[in-house]
Amino acid sequence: MTRADGSNRSAVRADSPLFGELLLKLGIVTPNQIEEALALQSLNGQRLGEALISLGYVTREQIQDALGEALGLHNAPQGFTPAQPPLGELLVGLKYLTVAQLDEALALQRRTGRKLGEIVVEHGYCTYKQLYEGLGLQGRVSGRQETPARALPQEGGHHRVMVVDDSPLACAFVQDGLVSLGYEVICFQDPYEALEQVGKVQPAIVLSDLDMPGIDGMELCRRLKEGPSRAMPVIILTANDNDTERVKGLRAGADDYVNKSASMDELAARIESVMRRTGETERMRKLFARYTSDAVVEEILKSPDSVVLTGEKREVTILFADIRNFTGLADSLPPEQTVGVLNQVLGGLSDAVLTCGGTLDKFLGDGLMAVFGAPVFREDDALRALQSAKMMMAFMVELRQRAEAEWATTRQGRPLTLELGIGINSGMAVAGNIGGAMRTEYTCIGDSVNVAARLCALAGPGEILVGERTVELLAGHESGFEELPPVRLKGKPHPVPLFRALW
């Protein structure tokens, strides 16, 4: 009988038994079954083991048990830890490599010092799935690794890691390595289940295989990044290390892309690196989220180099809003209730700014200043500012209706209604961090800002006054304006055109 690679059985080395000979020696198959499997192998290109399985002569479990038996790993004395069988021999035994291919790979390994797994996959001798099956078997027969199972979180781990891979052997291999380094690891072989459970598990990072049935690693990453877990870092583990796939993964939102042949130390280092970057990003997210909308924060974090915070001259649209009659209300309410009402009003006005993508510059007593166009510029900043102003007015109407009964009991019979005046103006301004070494704030300064503030001061209750440049920027939009007589403003030599927004 000849071997699958064409060489004679008598030439087989004692320390590299062929798979068919192993099964024959252990009495699992007969010579006729081996011959039949070899004939089938020559017809369809199957590996010998797969041919035996397809013919119904053996099961995959019998194959793996036979290897363990042949390597002397069964019935070991109590307390004995068997030596780890060489990966190359296991791959030969599983018929994923021929002896000739193994010899060639080992010779190349001695010359270059590279990993054996990396060499055999690169030369097309076996796939990464086959390599991981060999690694999983290597761990199990050496007593290091039990049958793959979902790990429970361990106390005192570095980070909780979610591993998503349809191969139980791959899950077990990554789990075993990371747990030995102190991580908490929870494995999922079904990507859909992983998506359902991510909110409950709350991992610090997700490691996902690229090629999986149902949804692949890129789609899993995309769904994580588009959902409530968008801030969660994702590393894609893959056997496909070409540049095209790497770029696709990164575009899907992956934070890193690691080849499956990487050592466990390298994978741990990548995890720590991503976690450090994510921690800094999250710190920036929380900082900016206090002043601007989530959409603007995402743009800042996505393209930080395009955002200038140190000082830049640009066209912006400024909005000032001021509560009318608040002083009278404050005189009629206890101090704690005054603060509560003010926070309620300013909270609603701030929500309008952030909803429309503006930046909350500062609170001014019983009013606020907002900027549209800094630190992120959009073509429709003027429209966003006007929409924000209209939302503020609608909020005040709703607030008065909701709180009228509560405030009436504290006004001592005197009629009092909270109103809002708003001024909007567009123009060039200097945007950047202003202040000293101890305290700075991001703001805009310039003539356009001063004009917006003065328009707000002129606005009557329930009125939105708009400057000429803002109206020009909104030409063509369905925004109604009533032209008012020009007004003289402090610091201006000539009357300034004035418009009232119709809402």
Image (cartoon, grey):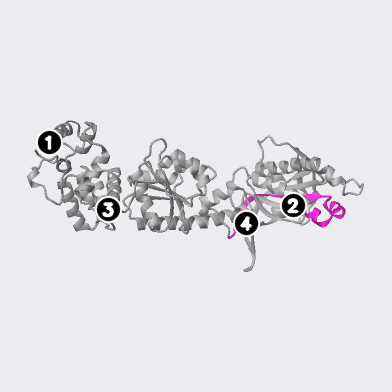
| Residue drawn at x 73%, y 36% as measured from the top left | 480
Of all residues shown, which one is farthest toward the front?
A: 78
Give the residue number, with chain letter if any, for mark 3. 142
- Mark 1 or 2: in front is 1
Q: Identify the residue under disc 2.
A: 343
Q: Where residue 370 is drawn, which disc sits there?
A: none
Q: CA distance from mark 3 to mark 4?
A: 64 Å
> Which residue is painted at 22% across and 57% down in the image?
112
Q: Amino acid at mark 3?
A: Ser
Q: Mark 4 near mark 1, Cβ–Cβ under 8 Å?
A: no
SS state under label 1: helix
User: What's the residue at 66%, 36% (across, down)?
Assistant: 477
First in sequence, mark 3 or 2: give its number: 3
| Cα distance between the residues tagged 4 and 1 | 84 Å
* Sequence-first disc among 3 and 4: 3
Specify whether 223 is left or right of 478.
left
Mark whose residue sits in front, 3 or 2? 3
Magenta residue span? 310-339
